[in-house]
Each structure stands twice: as structure tokens, then as C-alpha cells.
Amino acid sequence: MSYDYQTLEFYNFLDILKESFISYYAKLDIDKLSPYENADDILLEQSKYSEIINLVSDEIMLNKDEDSYHAIDRLINKEVSYDPKDLIIFANFLSDIAIMKSKLLSTKRIVYLKDLVVSINTLDDISLTIKTAIDDMGQIKDNATEELYAIRCDIKTYRDSLQKKLKQIINSSNASKFINEDTITVHNGRYTLSCKSNYHQYIVGIIQDKSTSGQTLYIEPSTAIPFNNAIQELAIKESEEIAKIIYNIISLFKASITDINLLIEKYSKLALYLDVGRFYKDKTIAFAEHSDGLNFKNLHHPLILLKQDNTSIGIDFSFGQDKQLAVITGPNTGGKTAALKSVGLNLILTYCGLPIFAESAKYVIYHNILADIGDKQSIVMDLSTFSSHMLNIKSIMEKSVDRSLLLFDELGTGTDAREGAALAIAILKYLLNRNSDIVVTTHFTEIKNFALNNSISMFYSVDFDYETFEPRYRLLKDIIGRSDPILIAKRLGFNEEVIELALEEVNQYKSSLEVSVDEINRMKAENTHLKITLDEWDRELNEREKKLTETDDIINKKLGKKEFELLSETYQLLQQSRRMVKDKKEKVDQESVENNIKYVESRLSKVKESFDKVKDIEVGDLIYLDTYNAKASVLSIRKDMVQVDINGFKLNLKMNDLIGKKIDKKQPAKKVVKIKDNSVTNHVKGEIVLVGMRVEEALDILETYLDKAIDSNVDTVNVVHGRGTGQLRKAVHEYLRKSTTIKSYRLAENQEGGQAITIVEL
């Protein structure tokens, strides 16, 4: 199996993964990531990633572990020195793995990764041995062994006794004459007193050191010598005992090196799963299903999506089964190359068991995925672009076997167009005979005709908006796209004479049939784009309807609960009244009935008080009544009674029963819209500013403004939509294109405001 990792940017994607990783081991292990060769292995790996993505949470179970990697490397490497701190780093690393293992197994939801987690031997005996002997600062603990404990106790006893004797000298009556500082210092490993150099005769002992100025001598008093000797002898014993402790731990470490290596190998795999799970968490992903053909829905190129999230547009691409050749056509900058790379890269990621950024996906297994994409010019090898492409294609032809997917970007370009096209068709024929599946982008009419005459071929065109001169970055199936270099040159402001000459040249050899076919394809592309847009609107409307239904259900449940409570209370009151009527032994207690009525009355009043009531109304005001779920106009007001008109029905209501809100006679505009009426002067053009508005809001305001402009006999207006993401500009142009009141429209020239403004002729 052979895959063109470099061209398809597989390693670039792995680099992005690494940037998000916590574990150093995972960063190393992902470099070993490679595709699986059969669908069962791919499915198992997908199941593991799917499981871990559902398991990981914000409280990730991974800790930073790079220190442990380097500590273990020093402990293993005989030529590198280490210290006890390396051992405690290793022990803490083992403890972290043990905690992570325990947490994963306690979830009870781990299935596919359970064998890996259970098989991790956390080497608790080594961890316990190290932590018993060494503290978190890398120092050997007093109780590491009984011998060390006894030695350190003796050292403490001697040190305390020595310090006591030295303090007696410092605190003596005449000490101020010869003692320079009231401190005990250690020099050459021996406890000393600081003495003034010209009074050293007052202290009998050995001079161990002196200050830089020579004014202070550090003297070991003769009474301290036996104690210092004993402390130094004990210090040697302490060092020997520490060396013995470390040696024993290192021996245990080296004896377990096989187990340690196995632990690191398994931990690295688990860390990789966890870090990958963190990366994909909360992203829109899909796991591709094995099938007899390719079928990607809303597929994104990972690098474009991750680096330019707002601009990434998914493509739909299906291929295989009874088709061997897919030809992608259309203008430059439309996304043909990105589509090629997206298909190739996402297939490799699928073979690795990873999820891909798509709504849904189906895949087949290819033995090879090989690509010739991009500029292959080599200065070092003295090769032209065409020559280097040919060398790469030659290599692809040699590697291609049964079930290969070959991706060619602009096959045959870089040389004489006619001969390049002939060579490209010959290459396609040869590779198709070898049972390879091929996806090729092209501008060559010859390749399009070759594909049209083969039943194993299918076409895609990149979606392009010829009104706004912008690519839509989608693929339209079964459409042969136009390259339109002359149109693009014209849109870019090319010399008109050159454009006319080019059109004359084209028309000499382009038949009317070809022109008709081009026009049919253009209309088909536009209809397909319209269908895609309508489908998206339909999907959005369905989602909104679903949310509204859910909200409605919640409200109905709350209302139902409240209704139940009210009916229950009313039922109890009615039952009580019925018992009172039926009981002939007692007279109906009129006072009790009245009390019940008063109670319900007070409850209703309290409920009414919680509602918003319409206040400060006048005749002619427009109000909204919650009780009737309708607008009403105020006809008359008499004391506490109000007459209103609701859709032609006149009602007399108490002022206190007007539950709702007052609607202003003049609704405030949602946005401030600047309008200049050019009917005042011929030198001022009408202008409307839509910058910062939502699309729906902007179109409503634009429609109203254009109607007023037409009524005012304005000929030309400026629509200021800004640059931004371009979504508002597209929506405005789509509206203008369909409007029957618009004569023409165009983007403003640079001196008129550039692409931020559209000039509309009414």
C-alpha cells in the first residue's frame, strides 16, 4: 500500500493535532500513525476513537508528562548522569497512570479500549519503593532504611551538642571583644565561629577559613573538634547508605526495564487516544462507513476548516461503483484543487480509523492513493514544471495497480495545449485499463469530450457565481463547468480591445452547438445551486420548527400542570358544596359558600396582579391583549371601562382587565438607515447604508427604500453593504438579480468605493 502523504498534507494535519496534545508520549506516538489495510481493523479503531471521544470531559485525565520522558531517558542511558529527583519524577508518572487507569475503568462505559487499559501494569512495587525512600524534592527520606535513620539521629545529636557548646562561647561575657558575628557557620564541612583577626588568640582552635578582606577568621574551637570529627565520619556513613539505597532502586529499575518499556508503549497508545478524543470533542465529525463506493456529504478539508473555520464550505462528492473517472471542471480559484486534496486526505484519515469533518461518509479501500498536485518545478534538478510533473506521473503509473485512486490536478498542462491534452488522454486510457479510479481536474475540452464518450465517467463542476464573480466552493454533480478565462479577464478590468479580439478568436472555432451546451450547463449549474440553497433553507426551517415544537411542548406541559392545580382546587370546592347541599340534616351554610367564593376571588386577583397591564392609554392607541392573543385599537374610554376593536369586533372591557402591552403608533426602526434623496439635486446620488445588519433585516429595509426611490423618480442609488464576509453582498445581489424593478447593478469602481458598494440603476 502506498499513499502520497506529503502532497495530500497528511503530515501537516498531524502537526495540527500535536499542537493540541497534552501528552509528550502522544506527540511521539502520532508520528507512527498509519492506515489499516482492511475494513475490520478500521472499524475497530473507529470504535476506540468514538468511545474515547464520548468519555473525555473538561476534566481530562491526562497530565503533562514530558519531564518523565527525559527522566526515564537519563535513568536508562549509562552515559548520562541522573539524580534522585529523576526517580521521584518516574514514581509520580507511575502514580498518574494508576489514577488515570482507575478513573477509566470506573466509568463502566469503556469497552473497546478496556483490554488496553487493563493490560497496563502500573508497576506499583517500584513506585512504592521510590516514594518510600525519596520525597517530592528528590531528597532521601530519613526513614528510607533503619541504618540511615540511626545515622541521621546520631548526626542530629552531635550537631545539637556542638551548637550548644559554640553558643556558650558566643554568649560568654567577653565574647563581644573577639566574636565578629553571633552566628555559627560551616567551612570545609566543619562548624566554626567568626572571630576578629586581631583577637584570634582568645579562641584556641584551628583556623578553617578567612574573609576576603582578612578582617574575619573562621575558627574551629578545640572543644568542637571531636564533635566535628564525629559528624564528618557520620556524614561519610550517610553518603554510603544513600548510595546503597539509590543503587538498590536503580537495580530494581533496570531489572524491570522490559516491563517499563511495555508500560510506556501501552501508555503512549492510551495517551494518543485520549488526546485525539480531546481534539475532536465538541466538533462536527463523522466516522465513514465501509461501502462499495465513495460518498461524502458536506465534507471539509481539515486544514481549511481548522485554520479558517468561518470560510470553510463542505462539498458533496460520490464516486465509484460503476464509475472509474471523475472529471472536475470550472474556473480557476473555484476550489478544484482543494476538492482533490480533501478527498485524498480524508480517505487516509479514515484508513487510520480517525473521524473526519463531514455530515456523513462512505469509503472503499484503495491499495494506493497517489497524487500529482501543485507546482513540481525543481531548481536543484534543473527540471521545468512540466518535466517534474511528468517524472511524478511516471512514478504514479509504475506504482498504480488494481484498486488505486489517482488524483491529477490539471493533467497535461505546462506545455503545448493540443499535445498536452493528447498526452493526458493517453495517460488516462492507460491507467483506466489498469483498473485504477481517477479524479482529474481540467480545463481541456479534449479531456471533457473523452469523458463524455465513456460510460465509466462522471462530471463535477465547481460552483461559481457569475453575477458577483466569486466562487462558492461547492461541487455540482453531472455538470460540465466552463473555464471562462476571457470572462474572468473582463471582470478583472482587462483592456476591452483585447477582450473583443479574444472573443473573435474563440468564435472562429467554437460552434453554435458548443455555445448552446455551455449555456445549458450554466443554467443547470444555477438551478443546482438554487436547489442546494433551497435545501439549506428547508433544513434551517425544519430545525427552527423543531425548536419551536420543543418550546411549545414545554409551555403546554407547564400550562397543563397549572390547569391541573386549578381544576383540582375547584373540584375540591365543588365537592364540598355538593356535600353541603346533599346533607339534609344541616342547612346550607351560606357564610361558608361566600367564604369559598371570596377565597377564589382573591386568588384570581393575585394572579391578575402578576400580569402586565396596559397603562396610560388614549383613544386611537394600538394595544396587544394577551387574553385574546390579538391586537386591538382603543375606540373610547369611560371611567374604568374601555371599548376596543379586535378585528372588527367591538368589546367593552374593564380597564383592570386589559392584560398585555401598549404598541407605539410609530414603530422605531431597528437600525439607523442613512438615505440621501437624489431628487433634490442631480449631483447627489441616493444612498442606503446596510452595514452591520442581518441579511433578512437588510433586505426588508432595502425593498422599502427602493420603492420610495422609484416613487421619487430617482434613477441611480448606492447600496452600501460593506466588505465583511461577503454574505450580505451576495444576498443583496441575489435580491437585485430577481427584482423586476432593477435595470442593472454593478460593484463600484475603486474611486467610487470599491467592493463595499453596489451601484443600482432603477
Image (tube, rainbow, N blue to C red):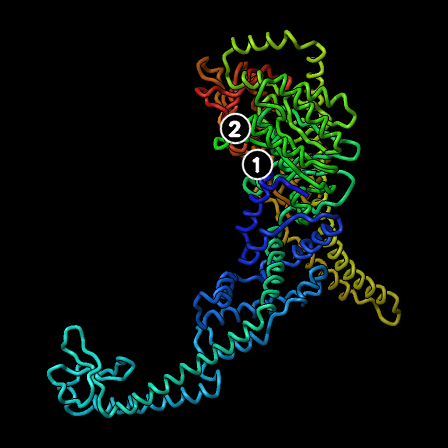
Residue 370 vs 730, above or below: the answer is below
| Distance between the alpha carbons at the discs numbered 1 and 2 | 36 Å
Rendering coords of residue 334 (x, y %): 60, 28
Q: Residue 103 or 264: which is nearer the viewer?
A: 264
Residue 239 picture quarter:
bottom left
Q: Residue at x 62, y 36 (%)?
A: 341
Rendering coords of residue 302 (x, y %): 60, 42
Q: Residue at x 61, y 57 (%)?
A: 274
Along the polypeptide, which appears first: circle 1 or circle 2?
Answer: 1
Find disc 1 in the rendering and name its residue. 311
Please indicate whether residue 5 sits to the left or right of residue 459 in the image: left
Residue 185 can be seen, yes or no: yes
Residue 346 vs 30, above or below: the answer is above
Residue 652 picture quarter:
top right
Kind of residue indicated by mark 1: Thr
Quadrant holding the N terminus = top right
Rendering coords of residue 587 (x, y %): 84, 69
Find disc 2 in the rendering and name its residue. 383
Kind of residue indicated by mark 2: Leu
Please indicate whether residue 317 sits to the left or right of residue 250 in the image: right
Q: Residue at x 48, y 22 (%)?
A: 676
